Amino acid sequence: MPRPSARRIAAAVEAAEAMATRRTPVICPLCERPIPPDGKSSLHHLVPRLKGGTNLGTVRLHQICHSAIHARFSEAELARRLADVEMLRADPRLADFIAWVRTKPPQFHAPTRMTKARREARRDRD
């Protein structure tokens, strides 16, 4: 029997997740607000794929929460010390954002820019 392709597996997982979402509300583990079925959301690899986390755990987050993580932290930093939702929540660079976004409605979304410190660090590295 042939093995299913990675694309087919991903599609099956997404379909199952969509069905489960319709039955029970998904809660964003970062901000702890519900993720509405029509709201913007994405999967966050706890260990970045570039750092070997392709087949490791993922969590569904609001898109704004996911963008906030990647705007503040490099892939290396995420892999090294922030590979857990509790560690992300405890980090002071993300705590202010979490406190702010918790006051917003579940479907809230806004563009997120890379932080000034991260832009400067990237510029210095390049």
Image: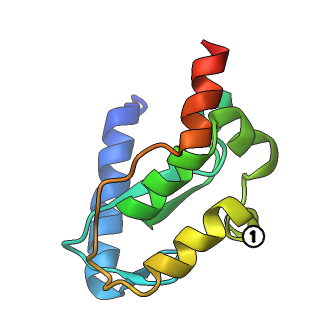
> Is residue 30 at all visible to an observer of this figure?
no
Q: Residue at x 72, y 60 (%)?
A: 84
Where residue 62 appears, x then y in whole percent?
39, 66
> Is residue 59 at all visible to an observer of this figure?
yes
Name the image quarter holding residue 7: top left
> Residue lying furthest right in this view?
81
Where residue 106 appears, x then y in whole percent?
32, 82
Viewer-side residue, 98 vs 12: 98
Q: Residue at x 37, y 31 (%)?
A: 5
Where residue 37 appears, x then y in whole percent?
24, 75
Q: Amino acid at mark 1?
A: Ala
* On screen, residue 104 above or below 66: below
Q: Dot 1, crowdedness within 10 Å: few (<14), some or many (≥20)?
A: few
Where residue 101 appears, x then y in whole percent?
44, 77
According to the image, label 1 marks what residue? 90
Name the image quarter holding residue 94: bottom right
Locate residue 96 relative to residue 67 in the image: left or right: right
Locate residue 49 relative to residue 85 in the image: left or right: left
* On screen, residue 20 above or below 7: below
Viewer-side residue, 115 vs 57: 115
Viewer-side residue, 10 vs 4: 10
| Secondary element at tag 1 | helix
Locate residue 39 relative to residue 88 in the image: left or right: left
Name the image quarter holding residue 24: bottom left
> Residue lying furthest top in this view?
126
Quarter of the picture containing the N terminus is: top left
Quarter of the picture containing the C terminus is: top right
Q: Residue at x 35, y 66 (%)?
A: 17
